[in-house]
Amino acid sequence: MPLLKQARPKVLVPEKLSPDGLALLRSALDVDERKGLSPEELLEIIPHYEALLVRSETKVTATVLQAAKRLKVVARAGVGVDNVDVGEATKLGIVVVNSPSGNIGAAAEHTIALMMSMARKIPEGCASLKAGKWERSKFVGVEVKGKVLGIIGLGKVGLTVARIAKGLGMTVNALDPYASPAAASSASVTLVSSLPELLSSADFLTIHTPLIASTRGMISDAELAQMKPGARILNVARGGTIDEAALLKALESGQLSGAAIDVFTSEPPDPESTASKLIAHPRAVVTPHLGASTVEAQENVSVDVCEQVLDILKGSLPRSAVNAPLILPEEYQKLQPFVRLVEKIGNLYTQHYASLPGGSMARNTFDLIYQGEVASINNTKPLFAALIKGLLAPITGQEGLNINIVNAELVARERGIFVSEQHSRDPHDDSSYSSLVTLIARPPSRPSSRASGLPEKSTGAPQLQHQRVISGTCSGGQPLITRLGRFEASFAPEGTLLICENYDSPGKIGVVGSILGREGVNINFMTVAPVSSKLSIHNAPSDAKFVKDGPTEVLSDVSGSGKTEALMILGVDRVVPQQTAEDLVQEGGVLSACAITL
Ligand SMILES: NC(=O)C1=CN([C@@H]2O[C@H](COP(=O)(O)OP(=O)(O)OC[C@H]3O[C@@H](n4cnc5c(N)ncnc54)[C@H](O)[C@@H]3O)[C@@H](O)[C@H]2O)C=CC1
Ligand SMILES: O=C(O)C(=O)COP(=O)(O)O
């Protein structure tokens, strides 16, 4: 695997994870199993890791994520990501993955096990017998057959519980505003439209939602009062969906006959907390968050997330990212060369035009136009992200800002960059390429430049402003720039380049070469880009498009000097000092010289 060649990325595993997945990681990464870390210890060591693998115990807070300078991925070996600050991870460009289905069977079976234990008083009977007693009449239970099970949240776990409950002869009602009616009906579940309706019909009530704003505290005093007297309640989803104080009261008053609880608002519960009183209640059947604790489920989730960690550290997309768009691997393969091209175009734009009067970020509204085969790609999020990364990298530094498909939109919004992506399957003017990607910076309109606080200085050359355009293609899978401003180019956007605008006259190359030689700069290659005779860009703000322009001479003589301009692109072996670039203008007679590194 290519990622093995350099220093091996490090993965921190602060909780018990099945060795099956970790074995996959060990072939490529340094796996550091550090169980029992305190929050302070986690904060201290997290800067050293590229990946963090957790279950439900580790609190991956904003502070932890901000301290994690190298972190690319947080992998949750399970379903619920309420212990991870996903919003902060998104801001920082850290991918959060989970295992959305590896443990649902285990969670559903545990729910049924708790329901049966509660109905038949199994924990009490077991404890009594182990204590040397033989108490039969004390532990008379109820049957679930013929009873109504109410489910809140008919997702993967909820639906699995429903199917098993149907097999036990129960009637199943469910409340879930987003559930598929077809899935409900195929499991013979009746979807109800309100919580009171569900509560008043249920003999057993079970919750299978995530812990989110709409479910936090959703069952409290008022809701418990609406349940049938003597009903029973289960929670194998998340602590906090049921108010623990209200539940304790309902058990104490006899409104509820029993409660079976696997999850608590704080885990492990504080000995003085209401949760601990609930745990101690004789009619509560409790387990210490064991819903996913089966050998099979732990193998599943471990392998699932470890494979995704490897994918992410290799630069591919994971299959179950919580905070990144889903892009199928086949589509990604097709996109990959263009991702590099668009990043180079963005980077070239900022470096090249930043050296022109007005500066690059004087323009913050761009058209990104896909023409030809590339236009058939529908999911262009990676291309958008590559553009934002490329545009900002010269300003922020590659390390300073981790921009990827996770956070690109957020970063663009925060920095006031607007991109209008356009797809055109019509053959483009330069038909020698099967695909063409073009970036056009729109000239700032008066109100928006004022609003952005970045007024563009007048250069006295309006034509130049209208030509901030870069086109490129992929040739043999490698990026190739085919147009830079008014010039028809053909160069690979790699390494250090010196871009000189000059009048196309004999001897100019020799002069430039000797000035560079004097400064010890070697030229690796050189290419001359003439003014394009084919294309021009019309500055139509919302539908920028290519059109054939007027006579070639008009384009060739934008400077009005009567001479023909050309762009000289030199690949050089080292960074060109600013002074040398100035010498090229002063002594070498070029119109402008701009050194960039791509
Ligand atoms: N105790 C344990 O060890 C385990 C607990 N879980 C927990 O179980 C829960 C459910 O997991 P899955 O079924 O895999 O998730 P899921 O995403 O497949 O299903 C959740 C369902 O809840 C529904 N929902 C969301 N808000 C709702 C609301 N306000 N009212 C009614 N329904 C609402 C959604 O529409 C969705 O259908 C999660 O919180 C997960 O963390 C999962 C596995 C193991
Ligand atoms: O997958 C989930 O949501 C769970 O609650 C399982 O938690 P755990 O991995 O056992 O700490």
Image (spheres, grey):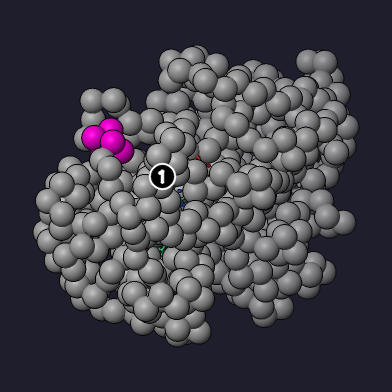
Number of numbered discs visible in the structure rendering: 1
Frontmost residue, 453 versus 243: 243
Looking at the rendered image, the quarter that the C terminus falls into is top right
Counting from the top left corner in percent of width and height, residue 269 is at: 33, 31
Considering the numbered disc 1 on the image, is that residue within a helix, a strand or a loop? loop
**Region of the chain picked out in magenta, as a range:** 276-280
Q: Is residue 257 above or below residue 386?
A: below
Report the side of 251 relative to 136 (left or right). Answer: left
Counting from the top left corner in percent of width and height, residue 296 is at: 67, 50
Residue 571 visible to an observer of this rendering: no
Q: Is residue 151 magenta?
A: no
Secondary structure mainly formed by the magenta segment? helix
Q: Which residue corresponds to the image point at 67% horizontal and 80% vertical from the top-left?
A: 426
Residue marked by disc 1:
134
Q: Which residue corresponds to the image point at 79% horizontal and 47% vertical from the top-left?
A: 491
Q: Which residue corresponds to the image point at 52% horizontal and 58% vertical from the top-left?
A: 109
Q: Is residue 277 magenta?
A: yes
Q: Which residue corresponds to the image point at 56% horizontal and 30% vertical from the top-left?
A: 15
Residue 401 visible to an observer of this rendering: yes
Q: Is residue 396 above or below residue 249?
A: above
Frontmost residue, 252 versus 17: 252
Frontmost residue, 286 versus 515: 286
